[in-house]
Amino acid sequence: MAYGISTYAYFWRVSSRAPEPMSLPDMLRDVAELGGEVFQICDYAPIESYDRARLADLRATADDLGLTLELGTRGIRPDHLLTYLDLANELGATLVRSMLNTAGHRPDTAEAVTLLKEAVPRYAAAGVTLGLETYEQVATDDLVSVVRAVDDPHLGIVLDPGNSVARLERPADVVAATAPYVVNIHVKDFAFTRRDGWVGFTYAGCPLGEGLLDYRAMVAAVGAARPGDRGINQIVEHWLPWQDEGYDATARLEHQWTQHSINTLLRSE
């Protein structure tokens, strides 16, 4: 097991609100400085346009920094998944995270199984694992049924219990249902706060250990379900709201949350 950081931990610093958005090499160097061992390039569409030379440079930078690379995308159409398998091979990544749905394609469970049975054997042959993330658009039970039906050790689940709260699924239930199939964990904490005037709630991120995520129980459940499996990396993400003080304050807090998360994970060993 290794601890790492996702591009989602740099959400605001790579956004259009940043005066100079961070590049992937910038993020790699920051991950290494913070003590991370893995960098997950997740939902970062520009990487699809990288040529082989640029991918090789990125891989060399990661190697020089002692970092393992992982990839993340959305969708399960075979041609798209195989594009990301090619990217993974160029980068030396052995895990690709995806989600069942895209804006233009929402397969039911039967179609999802058919599509994945076409692509997953290619992943298995290349030694790359495909992980499907838990999130509110797909019931956790349906996601588990898809993984079970495909029945390939190179297909599993990326566990992020905070996502499924919007579907009124309890994080503990999501953890229990997915634990035997987890191949990657997204670590982010979350909490509800009352809105002004006590009219409703805001559901957003918070520093790790200060919210509703029962981190120790989550890791214990996955470890108990998959004893001896040390290939499950834990990847730091955030749901950091934009700060009223502007970009500098937001970017500074984003960095602080990331450092806090990595430090917390390292102390948990």
Image: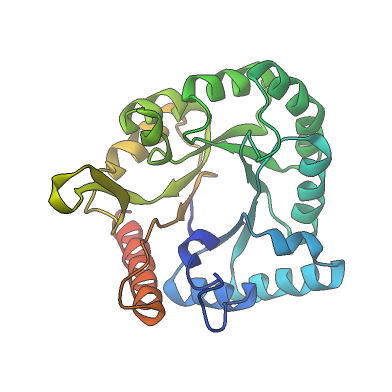
- Give percent across and percent down for residue 262: 37, 63
Q: Colour scheme in the image?
A: rainbow
Q: In this view, does 45 lie to the left or right of 218?
A: right
Residue 219 in the image: above or below residue 257: above
Q: Is residue 263 left or right of residue 10?
A: left
Q: In which quarter of the image is the C terminus?
A: bottom left
Residues 234 and 257: in front is 257
Is 45 situated left or right of 3 in this image? Answer: right
Q: How many labels does the image show?
A: 0
Farthest left residue in view: 197
Q: x, y percentage for residue 116?
A: 74, 28
**Who is closer to the viewer here, 62 or 106?**
106
Judging depth in this view, the residue of 147 and 254 nearest the camera is 254
Q: Would residue 222 be found to the left or right of residue 115 on screen? A: left
- Residue at (76% x, 49% y) in the render: 84
The answer to whether any part of residue 46 appears in the image is yes
Q: Quadrant of residue 120?
A: top right
Residue 201 pos. (x, y %): 24, 44
Task: Residue 211: give x, y in percent of width and height.
Answer: 24, 49
- Residue drawn at point x = 36 percent, y = 61 percent: 241
Q: Quadrant of residue 40?
A: bottom right
The relative height of residue 235 versus residue 184 in the rendered view (above or below) is below
| Residue 224 visible in the current orientation | no
Q: Residue at x 61, y 61 (%)?
A: 68
